Image (cartoon, rainbow, N blue to C red):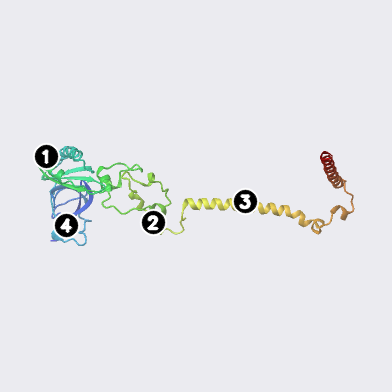
C-alpha cells in the first residue's frame, strides 16, 4: 500500500511538517491531532494529500502519523490550554523580572496533552535560564522548555499589519525566511530609507526578495532612477547652455566676418570717402586737454614745495 502524506503547520510556527495520514480523507484547513517528538499536538493541514510529497533525505519510517481529525472535545481542550497559556506567560514574565534576565518572552505554548509547556523568547545574547526553568516547573507542575527564536519569528508569532496595509507575510504564509540585503533594494531603485524598507521587526522587509530576480534578469533597465534622472537633467542643462553660448558667439562674430573693411583693419569712413561726424576728434581733444591739465597741476605743486622748503 502506498503511503499518503499531508503538510501540517502549528499555531506558533508557519513551518510545514510532513505527516503520514494513512486512510484519512483530509483537505486544506482541516484541524488534526498529530503525534510529534514533544507529544500530542493540534495542527492544521496546509498541503493536501494530492500535493504532499515526502522531502528528500527523509526516511518514511521516521515520519510521524496523524492520529485523527479534531473533535469537539479537542477544540474545548484547545480553548482551556489557551487560557492557561495566558496565565503561564504572566507568571514567566514576573519570574524574568525577578531574576533580572535580559530576555523578552514572546509566547507560551501548551501541548495538546498538557504534559509540556514551551516558552518562546528573544534575546541579544545567550541567557542562563536554568534557575528560571526550575522555578517555572515547580510553579506550573509541568515540563518546561525554553526556546530562543529570532526577531523575524517573533514578529510572525505576534502578527500585525505591515506598511502595505496587509497582514504580515511572516504570519500569513511564509514558512522559511530567505536572506534579504540592501542590494535588493538598490537593484529595484528603491529609496534607501530604513523607515520605508524595514518591517515591524526592524529588519529588511521580506517582500524585497519577491521580485528581485525579475529586476536582475530584465534587460535595458536604468542602472539608477535617481542618478540617471539627475545626470540627464544636468546633461540637458549644460548642453543648452553651451549651445546658447555658441549661438551668441556666432551671432557676435558674424558682422566682423562679413564686413570686409573691419576684417582688413581699415577705417570704414576713410575707405568709403565719407567724413566723420567729429565725435572721434572731440574725444581725442578732451583726452589731450585732461592730460595737459594734470601736467600743469603737477608743476604747480612742485613750485609750492620749493617755496616752502626755501
Residue picked out by circle 3:
241
How far apart in space, not on screen, are marks 3 and 4 (Cα)? 75 Å
Q: Residues within 10 Å of mark 4 (few under 14, many from 20)?
A: some
The residue under label 4 is 4
- Mark 4 falls on what kind of element? loop
From the image, state whether disc 3 or disc 4 is nearer to you.
3
Q: Helix or strand or loop: what does disc 1 sit on?
A: helix
Instruction: For the N terminus, give its image quadrant.
Output: bottom left
- Choose mark 3 or mark 1, whichever is in front: 1
How far is disc 3 from disc 1 in space, using C-alphas?
82 Å
Residue beneath the point at 68% across and 53% down: 247
Question: Could you tell whether 180 is left or right of 8 in the image?
Answer: right
Q: Residue 35, how many percent across, how many down? A: 13, 51
Q: Nearer the viewer, residue 61 or 252?
A: 252
Whether 137 is drawn above or below 220: the answer is: above
Q: Nearer the viewer, residue 256 or 309?
A: 309
Q: Position of residue 245 (x, y in %)?
A: 66, 52
Where 23 falls versus 290 (above or below)? below
Instruction: Report which residue position mark 1 lands on.
Output: 139
Which secondary structure lies at badge 2?
Answer: helix
Q: Is residue 31 at least partly visible in the picture? A: no
Residue farthest along the front direction in this orientation: 310
Tell me the number on the disc at residue 214. 2
Of the two numbered discs 4 and 2 on the same chain, state the one appearing first in sequence.
4
Mark toward the viewer: 1 or 2: 1
Say which label, 1 or 2, has the lower sequence index. 1
Given residues 30 and 197, the one toward you in this image is 197
Q: Do the numbered discs 4 and 2 sit on residues whose CB atoms are within 8 Å?
A: no
How packed is label 1: few (under 14 Cα within 10 Å), some, or many (20 or more)?
few
Amino acid at each position: 500500500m502506498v503511503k499518503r502524506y499531508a503538510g501540517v503547520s502549528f499555531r506558533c510556527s508557519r513551518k510545514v511538517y510532513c505527516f503520514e495520514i494513512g486512510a484519512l480523507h483530509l483537505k486544506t484547513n482541516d484541524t488534526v491531532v498529530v503525534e510529534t517528538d514533544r507529544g500530542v499536538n493540534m495542527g492544521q493541514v496546509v498541503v493536501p494529500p494530492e500535493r504532499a510529497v515526502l522531502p528528500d533525505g527523509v526516511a518514511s519510517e521516521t515520519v510521524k502519523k496523524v492520529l485523527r481529525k479534531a473533535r469537539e472535545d479537542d477544540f474545548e481542550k484547545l480553548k482551556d490550554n489557551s487560557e492557561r497559556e495566558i496565565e503561564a506567560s504572566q507568571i514567566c514574565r514576573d519570574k524574568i523580572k525577578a531574576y533580572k534576565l535580559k530576555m523578552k518572552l514572546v509566547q507560551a505554548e501548551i501541548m495538546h496533552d498538557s504534559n509540556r509547556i514551551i516558552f518562546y523568547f528573544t534575546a541579544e545574547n545567550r541567557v542562563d535560564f536554568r534557575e528560571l526553568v526550575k522555578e517555572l516547573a515547580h510553579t506550573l507542575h509541568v515540563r518546561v522548555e525554553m526556546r530562543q527564536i529570532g526577531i523575524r519569528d517573533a514578529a510572525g508569532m505576534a502578527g500585525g499589519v505591515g506598511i502595505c496595509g496587509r497582514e504580515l507575510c511572516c504570519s500569513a504564509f511564509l514558512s522559511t525566511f530567505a536572506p534579504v540585503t540592501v542590494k535588493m533594494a538598490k537593484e529595484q531603485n528603491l529609496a534607501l530609507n530604513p523607515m520605508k524598507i524595514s518591517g515591524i521587526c526592524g529588519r529588511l522587509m521580506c517582500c524585497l526578495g519577491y521580485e528581485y530576480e525579475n529586476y536582475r534578469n530584465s534587460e535595458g533597465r536604468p542602472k539608477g532612477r535617481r542618478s540617471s534622472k539627475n545626470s540627464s537633467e544636468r546633461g540637458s542643462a549644460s548642453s543648452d547652455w553651451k549651445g546658447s553660448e555658441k549661438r551668441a558667439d556666432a551671432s557676435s562674430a558674424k558682422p566682423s566676418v562679413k564686413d570686409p573693411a573691419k576684417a582688413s583693419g581699415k577705417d570704414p569712413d576713410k575707405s568709403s570717402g565719407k567724413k566723420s561726424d567729429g565725435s572721434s576728434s572731440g574725444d581725442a581733444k578732451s583726452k589731450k586737454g585732461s592730460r595737459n591739465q594734470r601736467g600743469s597741476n603737477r608743476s604747480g605743486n612742485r613750485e609750492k614745495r620749493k617755496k616752502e622748503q626755501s
